[in-house]
Image (cartoon, rainbow, N blue to C red):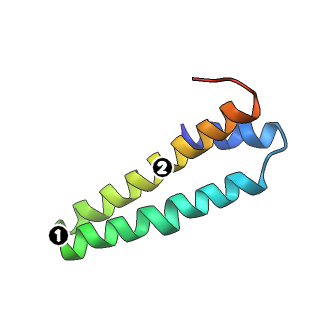
């Protein structure tokens, strides 16, 4: 979903904001969450994976909402 939404936004010539959304989803939300879960909540490698999946999920949500907004479609 994340890759599809990013591709759709690239197709309509929207690249700067999606890049920022991806940065936020991975570096601000996903990696710190993975770190906290792995090392502070004792989940080890499972915590890292949950952080990774969370970053992808946040990114997919942000990019899909951006695409819907840019194409004037509402939920």
Sequence-wise, the earlier of marks 1 and 2 is: 1
> Is 45 placed left or right of 58 in the picture?
left
> Is 61 placed left or right of 34 in the picture?
right
Q: Please tell me which residue is depicted at 35% across the width and 65% down the height of the picture.
A: 33
What percent of the width, then of the height, locates residue 16? 77, 56
What percent of the width, then of the height, locates residue 29? 44, 63
Dot 1 and dot 2 residues touching (CB under 8 Å): no
Q: Which mark is residue 58?
A: 2
Looking at the picture, tell me which residue is in the foreground, 44 or 37.
37
Q: Please tell me which residue is depicted at 42% across the width and 62% down the height of the picture.
A: 30
What percent of the width, then of the height, locates residue 56? 47, 50
Farthest residue, direction left: 42
Looking at the picture, tell me which residue is in the foreground, 7 or 28.
28
Instruction: Please identify the quadrant where the N terminus is shown.
Output: top right
Helix or strand or loop: what does disc 1 sit on? loop
Q: Please tell me which residue is depicted at 82% across the width and 37% down the height of the picture.
A: 12
Q: Please tell me which residue is depicted at 49% across the width and 68% down the height of the picture.
A: 28
Farthest residue, direction right: 13
Helix or strand or loop: what does disc 2 sit on? helix
Tag 1 residue: 41
């Amino acid at each position: 979903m994340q890759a599809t939404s990013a591709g759709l936004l690239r197709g309509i010539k929207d690249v700067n904001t999606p890049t920022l959304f991806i940065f936020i989803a991975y570096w601000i939300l996903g990696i710190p969450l993975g770190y906290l879960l792995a090392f502070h909540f004792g989940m080890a490698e499972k915590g890292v994976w949950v952080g990774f999946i969370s970053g992808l999920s946040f990114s997919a949500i942000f990019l899909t909402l951006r695409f819907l907004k840019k194409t004037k479609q509402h939920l």
